[in-house]
Amino acid sequence: MKAYWFDNTVGDQREDHDSGRSVDPEYLSKLGVLYRHCPSIEAVDSIASERSYKNRDEIIVSLEKMGSAYEDKVKAFFKEHLHEDEEIRYILDGEGFFDVRSIDDEWVRIRLMKGDLIILPAGIYHRFTTDSKNYIKAMRLFKDEPKWTPLNRAPEVDKIPARREYISRA
């Protein structure tokens, strides 16, 4: 995992966009973002048990797997949104980026690679993209039935309970 401030330059979302200013994992923790390196599925199973994750599946985001829908899917994942539940991803292969909003509403870019596990709290605005290799395989974990409905950033979304609760903790 590598975390840094997004450079905000125009260009392909899949490029690094590294400003050269790193972000400490402690700062991510203040945002409610939890990171663990898990060298084995047993380590993931342990976290899943601790946090009561009952379901999981796997997703491959790649041109080969998604065909002509790939570009549209990657653009959709990159729209700023939040979820009403935690978002948990364990990277099985490949690399990608999660961008999360900071306390000051700036983007923090988090590069994840094989063995990285990230937990985004409910209510945090974020977005996702593959890197320039256009391939990532991830395990998605869920507390109950799989839910991944994105709520795109809008004034009315700021009023939902998950967002209000997230803001009150920040």
Image (cartoon, rainbow, N blue to C red):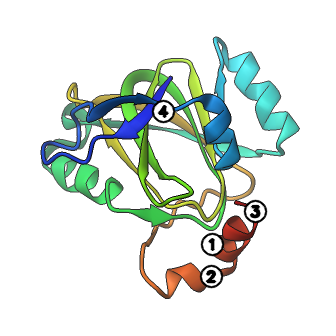
The residue at which mark 4 appears reads as 138
The amino acid marked with disc number 1 is: Arg
Look at the picture and state if 37 lies above or below 60. Answer: above
Query: Tag 3, which secondary structure?
Result: helix
Secondary structure of the residue carrying numbered label 1? helix
Residue 5, percent from left and from top: 40, 39
Residue 34: tell me if it is visible. no
State the image quarter where residue 154 is shown. Answer: bottom left
Q: Give the distance between the C-alpha atoms of the residues marked 3 and 2, in whole angstroms.
A: 15 Å
* Rendered view: 76 above or below 35: below
Mark number displayed over residue 75: none
Task: Give how far apart the Cα atoms at labels 1 and 4 are.
Answer: 25 Å
Task: Verify CB contact (< 8 Å) between mark 1 and mark 3.
Answer: no
State which mark lies toward you, 1 or 4: 1
Q: Is residue 65 left or right of residue 32?
A: left
**Disc number lying in front (3 or 4):** 3
User: In the shown orientation, is residue 48 left or right of residue 150?
Assistant: right
* Neighbour tally class for label 1: few under 14, some 14-19, many 20 plus, Cα within 10 Å: some
Q: Which residue is the site of mark 2?
A: 160
Left or right: residue 48 compared with residue 12: right
- Give the label on residue 169, or none: 3
Quarter of the image that includes the C terminus: bottom right
Mark linked to residue 163: 1
Q: Residue furthest top?
A: 39
Q: Earlier in the sequence, mark 3 or mark 4?
A: 4
Q: Nearer the viewer, mark 4 or mark 2?
A: 2
